[in-house]
Amino acid sequence: MTTIAHISDVHLPYHEKVTLPQLLNKRITGYLNWKLNRGHAIENDTLQSLMAHLKTQHYDHLAVTGDLINLSLEQEFALGQQWLKSIEKPNKLMFIPGNHDIYVPSGKGYMTHYWHEYMEGERAEDKYPFPFWRQVDDVALIGCNSAIATPPFFANGTFSRRQERLLEKLLIKTKEMGLFRIVMIHHPPHDDVMNIWRRGLTNRHRFKRVLKKHGADLVLHGHLHKSELKSLPGSHGEIPVVGISSASMGPNAVQPPASYNLYNIEKQGDKFTCTMQEYGYHRFGDTIEKRAELVLS
């Protein structure tokens, strides 16, 4: 059996001074949101407790589906690098970016410089960093990038024609290898996202099209800060699509409290079974408990 752990939307608290020149762009809206809203809900103690609980579990790989930081400041990327190193070795943690990791255009370069070890793997074409994949026993983890720098008040992502073409190559290859294929993307690929015009995945039809043609076994995403289970049509039936709450959201916040998921994947002949366990806080609670257990396939 192979176990994949999943967290998302860590939003590492950053309390150092931010200078005026750093805020003369989209960061000003994010900074105000942090000071007036999100910063009061995100709790470092919650994050530390959740990760300590996760470390008591046996898992083979940790999947992180974006938004490790908040404003794409270089200091945040350095802080994120320290945090990643404290959590897991690069060969056991796979990261894909979210919109807050590329909040402004400079974030892309900082992310590559500080976090590249956690985005290493085999690529469909070497000159393009995404999508990439790693093999973990009988599992293929395939990481896509939906994150782009957007104007103020927008948090949408995109899925390009190139990523569709390259993802197709990886889905074909990993299927031929007989692997359980997990696709990671930050933005949910659904049509019913609230305020989809400014928060959703544009060109999501491309993502859905390639999955419908070549299939996958599971899709993991973040972005919405809530746990949800939906599905997309695949080549041989419905594909489970799982979202997850923010890993640092306090139990007294308006949004759902912090959680992590474990996916236990077992090969039986030429078929796979996948069971999901969700662990986290209950609202207004102070302990981490198993909140759900579901058979996905």
Image (tube, helix red, strand yellow):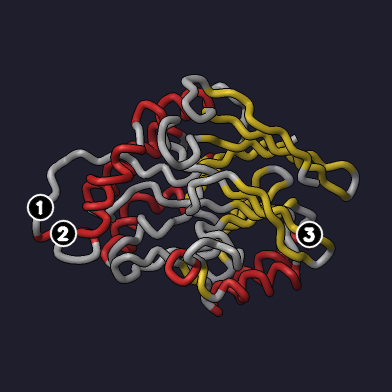
Binning the other alpha carbons within 10 Å of mark 1 as few (below 14), some (14 to 19) or many (20 upward) gives few
Q: In the rendering, at what x and y percent does residue 206 appear?
A: 61, 75
Q: Nearer the viewer, residue 162 or 138?
A: 162
Q: Is residue 118 left or right of residue 20?
A: right
Q: Which residue is mark 2?
A: 23
**Amino acid tagged 3:** Glu
What residue sits right under mark 3 in the picture? Answer: 238
Please name the residue shown 52% across and 72% down the image: 159
Residue at the (78%, 62%) spot, across then down: 176
Determine the secondary structure under disc 2: helix
Label 1 sits on residue: 19
Q: Are marks 1 and 2 in contact (CB under 8 Å)?
A: yes
- Quadrant of the image for the N terminus? top right
Q: Position of residue 89 (x, y in %)?
A: 46, 37
Residue lying farthest to the left in this orientation: 20
The crowd level at tag 2 (other Cα within 10 Å; few <14, some 14-19, many 20+) is some
- Above or below 13: residue 98: below
Amino acid at pointer 1: Thr
Q: Nearer the viewer, residue 53 or 4?
A: 53
Q: Secondary structure at mark 1?
A: loop
> Residue drawn at (30%, 45%), measured in percent from left and top?
37
